[in-house]
Amino acid sequence: MDYVYGPGRNHLFVPGPVNIPEQVLRAMNRNNEDYRSPAVPALTKTLLEDVKKIFKTTSGTPFLFPTTGTGAWESALTNTLSPGDRIVSFLIGQFSLLWIDQQQRLNFKVDVIESDWGEGAKLDVLAAKLAADTDHTIKAVCIVHNETATGVTNDLSLVRRILDEYRHPALFLVDGVSSICALDFRMDDWGVDVALTGSQKALSLPTGIGIVCASPRALEASKTAKSLRVFFDWKDYLKFYNLGTYWPYTPSIQLLYGLRAALDLVFEEGLENVIARHKRLGQATRLAVEAWGLKNCTQKEEWHSDTVTAVLVPPYIDSSEIVRRAWKRYNLSLGLGLNKVAGKVFRIGHLGHLNELQLLGCLAGVEMILKDVGYPVKLGSGVAAASSYFQNNIPLIPSRI
Amino acid sequence: MDYVYGPGRNHLFVPGPVNIPEQVLRAMNRNNEDYRSPAVPALTKTLLEDVKKIFKTTSGTPFLFPTTGTGAWESALTNTLSPGDRIVSFLIGQFSLLWIDQQQRLNFKVDVIESDWGEGAKLDVLAAKLAADTDHTIKAVCIVHNETATGVTNDLSLVRRILDEYRHPALFLVDGVSSICALDFRMDDWGVDVALTGSQKALSLPTGIGIVCASPRALEASKTAKSLRVFFDWKDYLKFYNLGTYWPYTPSIQLLYGLRAALDLVFEEGLENVIARHKRLGQATRLAVEAWGLKNCTQKEEWHSDTVTAVLVPPYIDSSEIVRRAWKRYNLSLGLGLNKVAGKVFRIGHLGHLNELQLLGCLAGVEMILKDVGYPVKLGSGVAAASSYFQNNIPLIPSRI
Amino acid sequence: MDYVYGPGRNHLFVPGPVNIPEQVLRAMNRNNEDYRSPAVPALTKTLLEDVKKIFKTTSGTPFLFPTTGTGAWESALTNTLSPGDRIVSFLIGQFSLLWIDQQQRLNFKVDVIESDWGEGAKLDVLAAKLAADTDHTIKAVCIVHNETATGVTNDLSLVRRILDEYRHPALFLVDGVSSICALDFRMDDWGVDVALTGSQKALSLPTGIGIVCASPRALEASKTAKSLRVFFDWKDYLKFYNLGTYWPYTPSIQLLYGLRAALDLVFEEGLENVIARHKRLGQATRLAVEAWGLKNCTQKEEWHSDTVTAVLVPPYIDSSEIVRRAWKRYNLSLGLGLNKVAGKVFRIGHLGHLNELQLLGCLAGVEMILKDVGYPVKLGSGVAAASSYFQNNIPLIPSRI
Amino acid sequence: MDYVYGPGRNHLFVPGPVNIPEQVLRAMNRNNEDYRSPAVPALTKTLLEDVKKIFKTTSGTPFLFPTTGTGAWESALTNTLSPGDRIVSFLIGQFSLLWIDQQQRLNFKVDVIESDWGEGAKLDVLAAKLAADTDHTIKAVCIVHNETATGVTNDLSLVRRILDEYRHPALFLVDGVSSICALDFRMDDWGVDVALTGSQKALSLPTGIGIVCASPRALEASKTAKSLRVFFDWKDYLKFYNLGTYWPYTPSIQLLYGLRAALDLVFEEGLENVIARHKRLGQATRLAVEAWGLKNCTQKEEWHSDTVTAVLVPPYIDSSEIVRRAWKRYNLSLGLGLNKVAGKVFRIGHLGHLNELQLLGCLAGVEMILKDVGYPVKLGSGVAAASSYFQNNIPLIPSRI
């Protein structure tokens, strides 16, 4: 019937794609529609207006590309930069690595600032580069807000302060794939020029929409940027925005209605409440890891991520075995360690449509698996640490008071 | 958007209606169909054949009434008995009480054998009654296999042995609403004459099918039973079974396809594996209750239920407050104490489409709530006890080995 | 994958179960819920209030039984009458026949007033009976508003006028299964005491809710009615209405949300617009039948039904072959002729979630089938007649103007 | 509830996105999954194998890009060609125009061979160009198999014969967006090097998968092609194919299961039967147009499309008004005339999950609209012509014989 049926619900704790709310599944359960009828533009208009709220921008222009995060990256870069442009980019884990790889393949000259995996972006190096760059040869600073491979969150407000300090005009491009709509993100306050995310992350939709949001400066830059782009070109979208039909090619009707439902849920909960919930989930997870006597891959508290926690395992354990076992025995999906940290970390994604009891079930599962693979964990210890924190911090559900 | 939205998944731990697998939701996501076309009888035929397997009967005849468990009760009684018939029935909790109430309203003379709530059926009293009933005035013995209000499972094989010992011809009618397809139930081996369940229990469907299964003796009895019935009459069904069209009135197309999917999942997991899973869930729950220092409403181990656990709270706590708080703060749905045990117990349903990590999430939630309401529980203690048991007993998921 | 896959959409034109709107399918696509949480009573309350609108009653009390139309019949009768009561009932087709059969099995003394199949109820005979019944031995008049087997609609306002003329206190019980929410039905204006319908008819839901609505007089009668009932007893519902929990046993969560969506759609379209749409569909179908040179089973215009048309075929054609062929060759589901009119009529159901172009597709299909089975129809003739009427009468869709 | 609710089913006759079968909607009604678990690669493997069958290739390599047809175009071009490459492309309507626009923006030197809109590709001009190109400066011939804007199908086998005649090594790139899986298409037989389609066309899925299939020659070409590509790069896919994990970035879980269901339905019906069904739908539509006294935009029979028909309206009618009216009054979605033929044609899409009675409903609707806008059509005339053809040609549904 299905490929690998296991009884009960799959416990999905990879850092994306994440659990989809029933409300969104329902909204998407529909036939196709003519996207040139008046209904689809009317819907699209509300989406473009409301999606700006999760970027915390009023001046930005959003684009809903039928693509993934990788495509959204490409759209952000090719619309604002020209081949040969010098950019600064931080290598702190697998996803920043992949973005840098894309930047290089797109023929930008990338100043890569590398950190150990588990550390945040070296912003002091950025400062030095900007200070030295009095000719403004640096055209953009590219940074992953939250590195999904290591669970590291970078301080974007500091990036802005550094740019401002040196009055540097470089564009500020942010991968917010595993942050936007879960972590505190402020496009306008922080002067971000392009921010992007994917539908399958904190918005809790299926994969399929790469959301790119451009500041007025970014739009301006796109008029002269010489990088080749067609499918990912903002210009085609802007043309159809002006016509009021919005779509240069066929969108997914189902994802549009799904996004409508997802945004409605975010606003019903309240964006600040959503962010607070992620803070609770992140904090509880870290307390559990500590209780187990394990280390967080993230090396300093300031970088701790509230959407994903990468857990270091002792050298005598292969973290891949933990992930395999989670799936095979407990119907639990955890994230693998990737590339440099393969075998060394496993990851717990705690973003999107998720609540505290779901996380506690996951943590209880991780404890059993740790025991399975020979790590001398005290069963219940992580759950106790997490639930002790939760019991003091979970608010009543507003709609049920 | 919804009535009382809370983020993340609702943790549904009432003892029915229970969690529906996605496979079943998918199967039910369909337009209506003409139930007189060849497709619906062909489907129905497979259902009637396969549903017998979950009753463990080859000689029984199943009926899929568009009704609830209450309707299934009425069908079982009115098709086999006549007004004024003497029957024996055991009062051990709210659901046996309601069935007895129905029996009395249907004008049977009911010998009620009452137990304290939390105790099982007094089978010794049954034995005495049967021994004394040399004239065979007792026409039926009615028993709830698993009393959902108290979490008490009765020993049906012993009922059969007692009936046999006294060579008593009384019909043996069983409410298996919260047992069949979760607990060990053997219609043929135990000589059960009518057994019944509801779709929203262990089969993990929506409410809407009352499944009644009749032995050859029960079918024979239905020919002379004088109780009035029309909607619930087996005769009408048997007529349409013979015609090969199966339905005297319109069935729910969606539930038929849903039942097909539900049965397929049971067989894919294996009925014995399903039962073993419920044993694990029941045992783990009891270990948690013990670790919390609380008492199980069920007074002896022999009566412990593997589908629902009623937990006694200290007198200074109102168990209804636990249930309210579970829903309001943790998006957790627990069962209320009913009638005699209202305010005294709360119930954890652990039946149907459910796995171990889901239960551990629930148990972690219960711990926090207990603390919320002033019970000095050690957070993590119940989870530790349960997961310690699980870690030793959960098999690999067969399809994933 | 499915049992009898055919490409494209199934054209469902049986007079029930009917096509379900996507909005309703979406609303039902959900997990179970605890029906004792505050959410379900809150939802139920709105349903009970709103469902009265489709009965056009403000004083009636509705009950949402988890059952079919047959169960709703039983509930209507057993709650208001006592065994041995004399009632008047009209036999005009298969469904009135089945209801009379039920009335007799429930031990009422039924004065059956029979018509030829294709004729309406003989209300003059009713008048004569009431005139003669000065002792008021007749306790109820039972009538099917719309006989689904023959496509005959009875004049209920005339029944009321006759009852009033003779100041006869008999209860007025109406089967509105294939009329309510499609034909003009006015419970309060016409002094109907019990009216009932099923969810799978004009409300366009799956089978599973038998909606019974009782007038204050009917509720009063239920206090003394001696017919045995338990599952179908209004008393149990009223008790839970008073408690504000609404449900004596487990409802189908999915159908409750589905009913909410179905009512919302009715109100969005406007109940009078819904009725007008059914008038158009009925009239167009009859024009097509006429254009084909065939006869309507319904013998006079006053009885024409706007929800189902039974078409008489020439004696040399077996109407069952038309139905079989429709399904086998054209993926079209038509209604069989039942009982006395088996082989002689086929039926086109045109009720529920249906629009004009759907009907025209069906009519085009019927033309081809008629030709297939040897009837010399002019292809396009029925469609031309129907669309000529439609083209003059279809209003713009209000939400799209 | 919805944006523009109209009663009954929307009649979706735009040439994409098309009607989705319930089986596919069901398959897609699911939560996200970890795409790195063993389940998703196992599923993907079957998809890649089976999707080749609808391209009729055994040697091709398919890619399932999370994109639209426009993205698939870009992938086809950038993986096989280098900036400055000379290519030949045929301008015969809006979609070939858009592809040519993309080709030019991607910096290829395009020899545009233009036809009147309504004519097919001028293959004699291609022949002349190839004959003259003894140096093989032409690197690719790009052709739209079926121009969706005008309903013109080009003869691809002839393109191959011309290439072969001149032993010209140019790559043969085909847009099969509105043809593959509906029209006769033979990648291997016709020596097509890259063929592509979109999920929302004949496969009857939501928008979101751009399927690109590459011949061994195309794969070889991709090793040296210098066009910039990252998101659309085949190389990344091939790398993950080799690893057996298949995905360089996150796919849509829902679309993968949907594609599985869609392919299963195609194979259940039989690909040749699918093609034959489209032939019937196309032929019937053309007969109706003729009966109405209107002209097909397609100027010769050899170019007639079996997936979309563009109908020319008299000069005194604005075809956009027909489309608007269809939607506003009849809940019918027709295709607009685009660009050069805006206002002059409306389009009937007849591809994907569609059967004959659905089309007849549409044709009946078009007749009424024509009358609405003042064209003197004889109602029923088109339906008669179409159904006369259908009645002689529709086979029995194989699964129902």
Image (spheres, coloured by chain):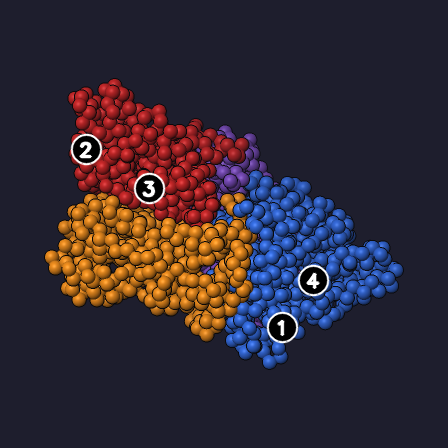
Chain colours: A red, B purple, C blue, D orange
Q: At 17% across and 47% down in the image, what residue appears?
A: D84
Verify CB contact (< 8 Å) between mark 4 and mark 2: no
Q: Position of residue A345 (x, y in %)?
A: 25, 38
Q: At 20% across and 49% down in the image, what residue appears?
A: D109
Q: Which residue is mark 1?
A: C294
The amino acid beneath tag 1 is Leu
Query: Neighbour class for label 2 at 10 Å: few (<14), some, many (≥20)?
Result: some
Residue B208: quadrant of the picture:
bottom right
Residue at mark 1 shares a chain with residue at mark 4: yes
Mark 1 and mark 4: Cα distance apart in space: 20 Å
Q: The residue marked by circle 1 belongs to what chain? A: C
Query: Neighbour class for label 4 at 10 Å: few (<14), some, many (≥20)?
Result: many
Give the mark toward the camera: 4 or 3.
3
Q: In the orientation shown, which residue stands out farthest toward the front?
A: D316
Which is nearer the eye, B274 or B51?
B51
Q: Which mark is residue A236?
A: 3
Q: The residue marked by circle 3 belongs to what chain? A: A
Q: Which mark is residue C153?
A: 4
Mark 4 and mark 3: Cα distance apart in space: 58 Å
Give the mark toward the camera: 2 or 3.
3
Which is nearer the eye, B62 or A374?
B62
Verify CB contact (< 8 Å) between mark 2 and mark 1: no
Q: At 69% across and 62% down in the image, what residue appears?
A: C153
Q: Which residue is mark 2?
A: A85
Verify CB contact (< 8 Å) between mark 1 and mark 4: no
Mark 2 and mark 1: Cα distance apart in space: 79 Å
